[in-house]
Image (cartoon, helix red, strand yellow):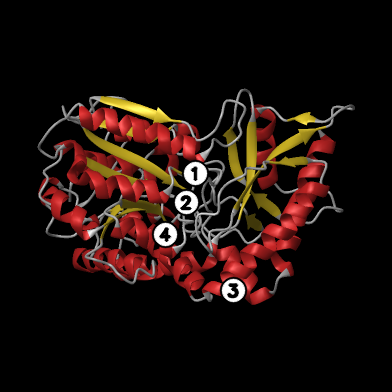
């Protein structure tokens, strides 16, 4: 048993010979944000580790609370691998489960022209960024300029991960780390951040973002630097930038002088665009814990065959062993040789849950999915316009592909204060976000509680809440009819109105 695995198991409590409860297993193999708080039973995102039938899960743009389908799948895997509280596990079963999960993820993505696509599991989307950056930065050759979106629309730890630095005080496998310290001497020569929104919170022109990045790439490559570019396909508020055509065009034109990671961790991109990126030589980061509805901390890299051929021989820093396990990777990658933890059991349980939700979603015909999303968008947009409690964000975003209609709906919470309504400040938005999860004990209010997306900073002293569709919600709507989602959304808006009127 590795030191990292013993550290993770120590978080559970005293060892015993009995089986490990699936709720405990789901909290293994992630950093401090996944730990269950003893008093509340919730993790750092406010999610519980078991199904919560009275919680309406509109918060998938931040994190998803596990549903019945996923929990059942995770329970079955926990039993199959025989995980016990003393750390014992049937390693052969766990290794086979890891290989099967990697392949099932690729299969359920619906990729028709795979070209040798391989999957590497990661404890979170930020961990996926860290793993990719470690591989790229250890490629022999000139230094790197990293170009990436600002953290407000992606994740607070992503800049440090791309910079080759520890992004928290604890790693996914339980090691104590120094936040901000470099994993090795391989770090980018410089990092350039591009904004996806203007200072007033409005979305920037996509062509302006494209041109800014194009100029930076030209300057770097002309000076002999290589470029590590992070594109975002589905930010916290639904933005895609830079444009997919320019992303693939840069890779085609520059070859090995540029490595591209598409941050699609929301996992909201249509299959056709995912295929487009992979066929164009771009690695794609996804998670099972947002749109797909799995529990938090289930990330992965989808690596095209052409990129895998370059990266699988790279030997990254030994410090990467604090973040990833051997069976998270295809066996032929050199990085595996430095990893002393065989399996991240918690990660496998979480991905098993996410894949069960993903399978249920993929069973819904694509045209039906598009119809459900379009119908909800029309109805909910009209609802938001009639609701004095909120002010929707009206981003004029380009339609990048058929079937890519918005599934994240950001809005300002409006506070009356006895006069002209004003936008809620970040503290007020966070308070409403937390209160939406709590039961309202008054008899006139339905017992449903609501999970929304955490407030996202837009502009100065400004924050927006988000109501988001997810794969489980869409699958439910397919079986329950077109009114199901809009009735739930109407109840959520009514609860927000009640909260603001109550102060």
Q: Mark 1 points at which residue?
A: 235
Give x and y (percent) for residue 239: 52, 44
Tell me the distance, in whole angstroms, between the alpha carbons under discs 3 and 2: 21 Å
Residue appearing at x 55%, y 52% in the figure? 60
Q: On screen, 437 above or below 102?
A: above
Left or right relative to 477: residue 169: left
Q: Which of marks 4 and 2 is in front?
A: 4
**Which residue carries the number 4 mark?**
273
Provide residue 405's location: percent of width, then percent of height. 58, 58
Q: Which of 208 and 303 is in front in this view?
A: 208
> Does the residue at mark 1 contact the one at mark 4 (Cβ under 8 Å)?
no
Q: Tell me: 265 left or right of 335.
A: right
Q: Give the residue displayed 52% in from the left and 53% down from the top.
A: 64
Do callouts 2 and 1 mark residues in contact (Cβ within 8 Å)?
A: yes
Looking at marks 1 and 4 on the same chain, the residue that comes earlier in the sequence is marked by: 1
Q: Quadrant of residue 499?
A: top right
Residue beneath disc 2: 266
Marks 3 and 4, the one that precedes in the sequence? 4
Q: How crowded is mark 2: few (under 14 residues within 10 Å), some or many (20 or more)?
A: many
Q: N-terminal of the two: label 3 or label 2?
A: 2
């Amino acid at each position: 048993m590795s030191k990292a695995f013993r550290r993770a198991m120590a978080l559970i409590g005293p060892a015993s010979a009995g089986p490990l409860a699936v709720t405990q297993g789901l909290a293994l193999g992630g950093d401090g944000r996944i730990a269950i708080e003893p008093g509340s039973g919730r993790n750092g995102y406010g999610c519980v580790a078991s199904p919560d039938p009275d919680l309406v899960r509109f918060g998938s743009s931040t994190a998803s609370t596990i549903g019945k389908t996923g929990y059942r799948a995770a329970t079955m895997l926990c039993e199959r691998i025989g995980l016990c509280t003393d750390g014992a596990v049937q390693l052969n079963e766990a290794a086979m489960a890891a290989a099967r999960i990697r392949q099932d993820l690729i299969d359920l993505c619906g990729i028709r022209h795979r070209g040798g696509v391989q999957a590497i599991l990661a404890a979170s989307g930020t961990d996926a960024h860290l793993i990719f950056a470690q591989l790229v930065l250890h490629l022999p050759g000139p230094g790197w300029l990293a170009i990436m979106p600002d953290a407000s629309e992606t994740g607070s730890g992503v800049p440090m991960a791309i910079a080759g630095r520890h992004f928290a005080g604890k790693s996914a496998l339980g090691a104590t780390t120094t936040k901000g310290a470099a994993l090795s001497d391989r770090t980018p020569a410089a990092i350039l951040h591009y904004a996806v929104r203007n200072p007033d919170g409005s979305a920037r022109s996509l062509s302006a973002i494209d041109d800014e990045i194009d100029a930076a790439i030209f300057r770097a490559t002309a000076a002999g630097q290589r470029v590590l570019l992070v594109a975002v396909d589905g930010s916290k508020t639904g933005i895609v930038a830079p444009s997919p055509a320019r992303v693939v065009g840069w890779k085609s034109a520059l070859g090995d002088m540029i490595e591209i990671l598409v941050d699609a961790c929301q996992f909201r991109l249509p299959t056709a665009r995912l295929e487009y990126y992979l066929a164009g030589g771009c690695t794609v980061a996804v998670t099972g814990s947002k749109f797909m509805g799995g529990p938090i901390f289930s990330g992965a890299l989808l690596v095209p065959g052409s990129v895998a051929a370059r990266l699988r021989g790279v030997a990254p820093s030994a410090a990467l062993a604090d973040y990833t396990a051997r069976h998270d990777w295809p066996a032929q990658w050199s990085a595996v040789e430095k990893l002393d933890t065989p399996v991240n059991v918690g990660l496998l349980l979480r991905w098993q849950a996410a894949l069960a939700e993903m399978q249920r979603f993929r069973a819904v015909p694509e045209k039906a999915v598009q119809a459900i999303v379009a119908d909800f968008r029309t109805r909910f947009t009209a609802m938001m316009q009639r609701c004095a409690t909120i002010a929707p964000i009206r981003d004029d975003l380009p339609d990048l592909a058929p079937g890519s209609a918005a599934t994240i709906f950001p809005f300002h919470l409006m506070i009356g204060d006895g006069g002209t309504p004003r936008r809620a400040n970040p503290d007020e938005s966070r308070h409403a976000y937390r209160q939406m999860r709590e039961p309202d004990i008054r008899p006139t209010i339905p017992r449903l509680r609501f999970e929304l997306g955490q407030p996202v900073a837009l502009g100065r002293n400004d924050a927006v809440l988000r109501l988001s569709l997810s794969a489980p919600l869409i699958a439910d709507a397919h079986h329950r009819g077109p009114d199901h989602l809009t009735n739930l959304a109407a109840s959520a808006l009514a609860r927000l109105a009640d909260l603001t009127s109550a102060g």
